[in-house]
Image: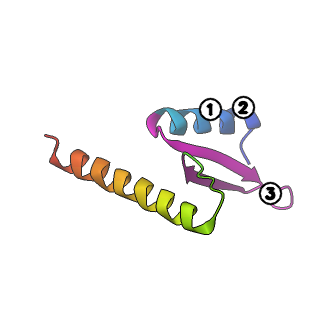
Amino acid sequence: MSSFAALDAQRAELMKSRPGWRIWYVPNAVDGSVMWCAQREPTIHAYSAEDLAKDIALADAELASEVQGWAAAP
């Protein structure tokens, strides 16, 4: 396993190049490996399952719009 300073530097570089993502790593003390993880931000909270479903649909639509914009950009 790399040093924590090296892992933190890799994480910082990933976060810099991938805005809108929460990125972390989980070291495995047994075998020295590292599991890398990412989650798109923002985390969505709602007071009901129905509201959460609506908010997720809105976030998905926004992401789809962004992706289409990226594909259309020269």
- The answer to which of 62 and 31 lies nearer the viewer is 62
Q: Quadrant of residue 51?
A: bottom right
User: Residues under labels 1 and 3: Cα distance?
Assistant: 18 Å
User: Residues under labels 2 and 3: Cα distance?
Assistant: 16 Å
Q: Which residues are magenta?
A: 17-41
List x then y, in percent, for residue 6.
67, 35
List x then y, in percent, for residue 64.
32, 56
| Mark 2 or 3, nearer chain start | 2
Within 10 Å of disc 2 (Cα), the crowding (few <14, some 14-19, many 20+) is: few
Label 2: which secondary element: helix
Which residue is label 1 attached to? 9
| Mark 1 or 3, nearer chain start | 1
Which residue is label 2 attached to? 5
Can residue 37 be found in the magenta stretch?
Answer: yes
Name the amino acid, label 2. Ala
Which residue is label 3 attached to? 28
Q: Residue at 23% of width from left, 52% of height from top?
A: 68
Label 3: which secondary element: loop
List x then y, in percent, for residue 65.
28, 51
Contact (CB < 8 A) between labels 2 and 1? yes
- The answer to which of 12 and 46 lies nearer the viewer is 46
Q: Residue at 55% of width from left, 45% of height from top?
A: 42
